[in-house]
Each structure stands twice: as structure tokens, then as C-alpha cells.
Amino acid sequence: MTEADRSTRQEAGPQPLARRRFLGYVLAAPILTTAAHLAPASEARAGIPSPEITKLIDLNDVMTAAALPTAGLITVEVHTDGTVSFALPRTEVGQGITTSTAMLIAEELGVPLTRVHVTLADARPELLFNQLTGGSNTTFSTYTPIRVAAALARNRLLQAAASAWDVPVTELACTAGVVTGPGNRSAGIGALTRKAAGVRTEQVPVSLKPHDTFTVIGTPHNRVDALAAVTGRKKFTLDLNVPGAMPTMVCRPPTINGKVGAVFNAAEVRALPGVTDVVVISTGVAVRASTFGQCIDAVRALKVSWKPGSAAGKSDASVLEELRSAELPLGLPSLTPQVEERFTFHFRSNSALEPNCAIADVRFDRAEVWSSLKAPIVAKEAIAAKLGLPLGAVTVHVTEGGGSFGRKLFFDAALEAVEVSRKIRKPVKLMWHRADDSRQGRTHPMATSRVRISYLGDTVLGYRQRHTSVATDLSHGLGEIFTALAAKLPVGDAGFAQTFFQLSQSMPYDFGANSRLLSETDKSFNTGSMRNVYSPDVTCARELLVDRLAARMGKDPCRFRHDFLRDDRSRAVLDKAAEAGSWGRSMPAGTAQGIAFHSEYHSASAVLVELDCRPETVNRPVRDGVAGPRVTKAVIAVDVGLAVNPRGLEAQMMGCLMDGIALTLTSSLHLRDGHFLEASWDNYFYTRQWNTPPELQIIVMPPTTGKPGGAGELGVAASMAAVACAYSRATGTMPTVFPINHGTLSFEPKPTVPPVPASPTDGLDHVR
């Protein structure tokens, strides 16, 4: 067996479903309804030789294994009008999964993509762990079950036509939603669905299409919801017209997680125009009014005394001191040469473009909630417990969301909405202000990462990394998955965070004995699983030290990576990015290239950037902002095994690049005296137009494994690391604090009382 063969087999991972023949269900229903039947994935065996846990099983494998037992509860339906429907038990938040899901069904069923209607399923507790969106897992885990259900539907339609026409089923075909046969016979699938329907539920075998016959999967497609999005017809939570649900906002404390002491002017605020209700809740004082503008006026008018919050008195400096105290030792210094560094990563906001929001209608015996939720089953259970209602009395509708990046794994707005609705006995349409999400919402935890690499001559002997972080909240459902599968995971008795960390981190380089450990401290902050979770910080620290090690050895950084990468797939991705980006070309002083590699969830990515750090670029005048260096060119090469929708994958990688640029250069929260200074997007510096590359190329590598790997977060870590490496080479100074502009406070912080700043009225004054 060649090295390439071994690499392909290893990257493909366990393949209990490698054959194209599967079992599925035809369900008893008036119209054709089908589902997949898949056996749980085989357990990782301790006897398999591998230096990496993630070569045995990774986070994506765990989530997929947890979802398999309930795959048969997810159905494809063929309707009499010739359309096909599927209620996806995941959440569309802009990542394009409704499009890729429709493509899977269209491919196997033989129908036009426009006739496949994918909606989002309500919370379904019977699905157990099969309704959690995260970890780049949606396409990875649903690729086979959805195809099996669609292929089974195709077979039943062919059999129904064969029976009606008295011809062998082998002489029939289903194309463009029409079954055709000998003698120019044809029938639309809508005309056949009742005949193909099952009178009883039965298990039947089915074969999937071979890859070389694909006409939909692997072909670039525009998003199925693109027209609705650009014309304003796409419906998000706040667009829904739920009878009686009126705008509602919350007056929040000046420090993180503070509590209401007393409200001094509730009656006065209740008398303001449009205001219907003022009520104290666990997180502040809620106001309900006719418009959100009136809610803002009411919030700003409230006079409240507050009790200290969970992070009272804390600052960037004090948290950094806590982190350093909690760092695990790297061990005794090596007797051979080594490179070593400590990196600091400040808090970052997990706000999405869509404000945190939910609609709730709570009655004495039931509750109904609408929100974009990536863990709707956990949300439903939490809501039922909060209200003291049976689980069956709570209905949770999952709406499409305007971005998430991990934020919508949490359902803070939904919990607030049901609390307000129960107290005032009226439906509410609750929205967080931008300042709420920056100051009281979920954050990416502040962290430090120490890395040591020992070497001798041209040989790397060992790699150690100790990552220390403010505690990451994993109460959104992943913890339950780890608990359920604990006996099958090769991580011993590690806690939730350590398990997540070990299953999501890999070492792509042949660096001898290596270890990565996580230590967490301080649970006083509202944290979350921001996009790519630990990987951007961990990978950035590693790749910077790889550059330093290459310099110590007198080697080109790209060639050094190529020589130490473990497999051919990884080397091919790195080589493609280097070739397309003209790695090593001559650059003006103050500018430089940077290159980095990252692999996860059976996928690989390499990013090359060019960064301009010259004074005339860094010091560009930006009102109340920091311009900083600019990425002038970026090349991303990505291998996801099989890209269902290459165009959607390109969009994901573009977003990953913007995240990476932000994390390296400008994006952070400043903690002072128990609160964050940032209060909106205008002073939280996510990547702006002045820092985006005018030249961008995204290369999707040809299929390598025959099935999709994880892709939703894949490009973030390599993008962050590539920008950091370019900065180091352009300035001659390795950055060790991120983002590099964190030390510059370029704006006047808005007050914390009132918690919502006044709406700006000077917009036209700044138009050029």
C-alpha cells in the first residue's frame, strides 16, 4: 500500500457504511414518506495504532454517532403537486444548509432543485441528540441519512410506475421529477405518490447513486433562499406576526450579571407613550410597548438600583493574572534546543448580525416560542422547567437566523421572553439591543496559550501546548452527548471542556511526542462556543512557533510545513495555496506574506495572505476606529473530502477569512470594572471594509474521500494564523497579544447607565 493510499484511508476514518447499499423505511402515510435506517457507528478500538485521538474519533464523529439512532425519525415526503418536502432538524443561520440539503434530495430522488422545499423542524425531543447544529456537523452527519430516504422514495416511485404499466422497474428512470418508461410513457412523481405510499411501515433495502453519476452534488449552486433574502421576503423571528406579541426590551445592569435592587419609577415609565408593561425579571427590568423605539425610551428612563454582578471589579489585567495562575506546567525544559512562547487572547464578542430575539406566548397551561435556536430540544426542556410545565405543553418553533457563529446555541432571549410573558400574561416580541449583546451577551473566553517545541538538528523531538481559558459554557447540549457516549470515547474521565478540547484539536505535523492540555478557570462570565471554539487561538499560537522554528532551522516556512505535514492531502492543500499565492515572491519593506495550515473533522485548509504594515496604511484616519494593517491579498485552499455545494463552501471560507482577520487585528472586548466597554458594532471592530483584501481566491480541491468533511468553521483558524504570521514577518516582531490593536482604545465608551445608548442622529454628518 502506498503512502497516499494509507493517508486516504486514515483521513476517511471509520467506514461502517462504506457500501452504497442501505436499509430504509417506507412509512405508513397517505403520500409517499420515507426515512433512513442506519446502525450506530462502530466504537473506536483501543488497539488501533495512532498518535492522535482525532485520528480515531473526533468531535464530528461523536456528534454523528449520537444522531444515528434517530435517523429513521427524519422523513422525506413526496406531495401530489410534485414537490418534495423535508423538515431539517438543524438550524439555517446563513451557512446555506437548506440549499445543500435540498441538493442531496434532488440528486437521489431525481427532481429539480426548485421543487425541493426544506423547512426547519420544530423542537422534537424524540430526536434526542439529532437536533443540534454546531461543530461543522450538519452535512457530515446528514449526508447519508437524507440520501437514503430520498433514494428510497425514488425506488418506490419507480416500483409504483412499473406496477401500473406492467413493465420491469429496470426499464424506468426518474429524471426532473418525471418517471419515464418504454413506449414514451411518463408520469409526474406527484401522480404516483399515493400509489407509492406505504399502507404499513416496512423496512426495505436501497442503493445510493455512485459518485460518478452525480449531476447535482458537487456542482456549484446558488442558495435556494437567495432571492427571498435580497428582496426582503425571507422571514426571521422579528418578521413574524404573532397575534398580540408586542415589542419588548430589558433594562440591564451596569455590570455583568448584576441583579435588580429596586425600581424607583416603574409607574412613571409605565405612563410613557406606548408602554403597556414594566416588570422585574431575573436579568433586569422588562418593558413592553407599541414600538421598539418606545421600548428604548422606556429603558433609558428607568431608575434602578443594582446589585453587583458576577464579574464585579474585574478587568483585563485581573483576568490575565487568574489565567496565569491556572496554567498547567509545560514540564522541565528540554535538554535540546527549543522554541517557546506565551500568547494572550482577549475576550471577543459572540454577537451575530441579527439581534438576539424571541417571541413567546405563555398561558397557564401551555407555552409557544419562536426563535432561531441551534439546540431547540435543550431550549424546550429548559423552558418547560422554568415554567413548571410538562414538556409536551411547550412548543418551540425554530426560525431561520441572521447569523450565529455559535451564539444561537444559547437561548437567553427565549428564556427571558417566556419569563416576561408569564409575568404579564401577554405575548411578547423580545429583542436585545446591540449594547446588551456586547456587554451582557456571550463572549469568546479570554485565554492564554503556552507552546514549547524541542528539536535537534533537522528533527523535531516534541511539541507541548498548555491552553488556559476562562471557562467555556457547554450547557447547550454537547455535554449531554459526551455523557451519553462517555464509555466509548478514548479520553478517559476528562470533563466536558477537556473532552471537547481533545476531540476538536489535532496535530497535523510529525512533531514527535506531542501533547495539548486545557485548563479552565473563572465561571463568572457569559461565554459561548464561538465559531471554531478553541481552534483559532490554539492554531495561531502553534503556527507562529512553527514559523520561529523554521527560522531557527534556516528553512523556508512553507517548505518546513510541507516537509513535516503527516499526509498527502494536507501537503496538496498547502502546496496549492502556496502556488496560487506565489509564495516567496519579492515584497516591499513593511509588507509580507504569511501562510498557515489547519485540519479538523476530516478536512484540511491552508491560507496564504499578504499584509501591508507600512505606516501610511496602519495610520489611515478612521473616525473612532483603528485602521491597523491591511490584508491586501488572500488565497484559501480547502479540501473537505467532497463539497456538496462548492459555491456555498466558497462563501463559508470567505466568512472564515473575515473572522480570522478580525481575531488577529482588531476584534476584542475591553473589560473594565466588571463590564465591557464596547456597546455596539460601531465600536466593536469586526473586520471592516478598510481591512478586507482587494484580491481573494478560494480554491476547492477535487474530491478526495468521497464524502463530506466538516467545513463550517474550517477556515477560521488558518486565516487567523496566516495573518499573524504575515504580521510577524512584515514587522520583524512576533505578536503575542491578540488582537494586535487591543491596546489602543479608539472610542469614547458609552455609559453603562442607562444601559442602552441614545439612538444616533448625526449619521448624515459623516457622509462623504
Image (spheres, grey):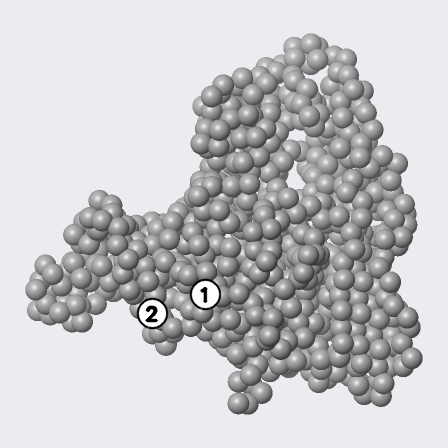
Q: Quadrant of residue 144?
A: bottom left
Query: In the drawing, what numbered circle is on residue 21?
Result: 2
Q: In the image shown, does 56 or 189 lie closer to the viewer?
A: 56
Q: Closer to the camera, 393 or 45?
A: 45
The residue where tag 1 is placed is 644
* Percent x, y of residue 627: 79, 55
Left or right: residue 109 versus residue 747 is: left
- The answer to whether the residues at label 2 and label 1 have Cβ atoms under 8 Å apart is no
Question: Relative to 471, is 5 on the left or the right?
Answer: left
Residue at figure coordinates x 90%, y 45% from the top left: 318
Q: Amino acid at mark 1?
A: Val
Give the residue at x 85% y 53%.
326
Q: Position of residue 210 (x, y in %)?
A: 35, 74
Q: Which residue is more in the foreground, 606 or 54?
A: 54
Residue type at mark 2 is Arg
Decide: few, some or many residues near mark 2? Use Cα within 10 Å; few <14, some 14-19, many ≥20: few
